[in-house]
Image (cartoon, rainbow, N blue to C red):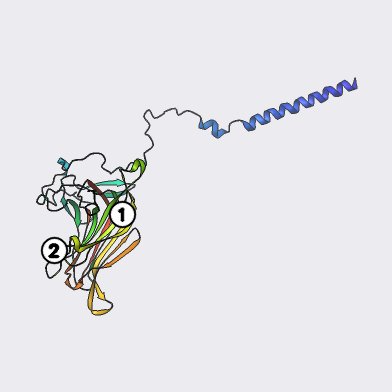
Amino acid sequence: MKKSKFIYKLISITTLVVFVAFFSCSAEDGPSEDTVFENVPDPDPDPDPDPDPDPAIIIDEDTGSYTTCNPDGENATRTSDDLPNPVNVGTIDDRSCYANYKESIIDGVTWGIYNITAGSNNQDAANTLQPRIERSLPVANSNVGSSVKFKGDFRILEVGDAGSFGQDGSYIAQAKGQHTGGGGSADPAICLYRAHPVYGSGSNADKQVAFDIYAERILERGGSGSGREVILLKRVDKNEITSFELEVGFKVDPSDATKKIHYCNAIIGGEAFNWNIPDPERGTQSKIRYGAYRVRGGRAQIRWANTTHEKVEN
């Protein structure tokens, strides 16, 4: 009898232990409060939710086919169709009927839009000068200590492609300045910063994915064509925000205090590219232009933001 009671108690205790263990495990393995609330359906769902943005889309890029001229790109004069209060400094020089200067705001930054196409110069005689939408800036004299300095950020989305190195590329900025003794243009370029297309591979073989920045420098005052050298500076990716600084001016020649140096110093993406202009004694001024200039084939799209200009004269 005692043995039967002992067996009964043992079975009861064992059953109780199993019961408690089962429900303890069920409670631990079950969904947490967070999980339960995460699965509660939205009582007021968005009937037309926006899809996630495509990171490859650049909101201020022109894509697809294009024509040389468009109705909204026509301009009566080179300065007639600027915005009332443009975010970019300088006076517009618009010689393209493809598009007028516009602006876009991305991540709180306002960008000036410079788009040009081959053959779109509607201001100069046909087949003479290249299309451009540039901004001109105040000019400094040739006295020692006089200079001009431009700062800004650029993005390159597309540049001209005419099928050969000498014809490819578009200018994003340039140093200019007149000189004594004649020769060349009446308003000559001194150093132009030229972006060349770099194409991808595979499915991107027909897409411009990066750009090589070259300096196109005169070898002599008034030099053009063979009178210039083209020097590779650096590569930037498409749509990469790149800082740009250009200072052009006159200073004393440290090797001879009776002479002066006409310098053209650029800093692109933090890298310095300093250069002394030939025949400094012949130089009479320093000035800078920027925007988009030259497209012998295709289309060019350059963006500028955070632009400033400083002029110092002695």
| x then y, percent, for residue 185 | 13, 62
Which residue is the extreme one toward the right? Answer: 1
Amino acid identity at mark 2: Gly
Residue 152 appears in which quarter of the rendering?
Answer: bottom left
Residue matched to label 1:
212
Describe residue 111's horizontal placement relative to residue 81 as left or right: right
| x then y, percent, for residue 86 | 22, 51
Residue 43 appears in which quarter of the rendering?
Answer: top left
Q: Is residue 89 above or below residue 34?
A: below
Q: Residues within 10 Å of mark 1 (few under 14, many from 20)?
A: some
Residue matched to label 2:
184
Q: SS class of the residue under badge 1?
A: strand
Q: Earlier in the sequence, mark 2 or mark 1?
A: 2
Q: Residue at x 82, y 25 (%)?
A: 10
Q: Is residue 181 above or below residue 105?
A: below
Describe residue 75's horizontal placement relative to residue 267 as left or right: left
State the residue in front, 119 or 241: 119
Q: SS class of the residue under badge 2?
A: loop
Whole-number angstrom distance, CA of label 2 to CA of label 1: 27 Å
Q: Is residue 28 above or below residue 210?
A: above
For the N terminus, which image quadrant?
A: top right
Q: Is residue 235 above or below residue 254?
A: above
Please say whether residue 287 is visible from this viewpoint. no
Residue 84, numbered label: none
Marks 2 and 1 close (CB-CB < 8 Å): no
Q: Residues within 10 Å of mark 2 (few under 14, many from 20)?
A: some
Residue 245 appears in which quarter of the rendering?
Answer: bottom left
| x then y, percent, for residue 226 | 19, 62
Describe residue 103's horizontal placement relative to residue 57 as left or right: left
Amino acid identity at mark 1: Asp
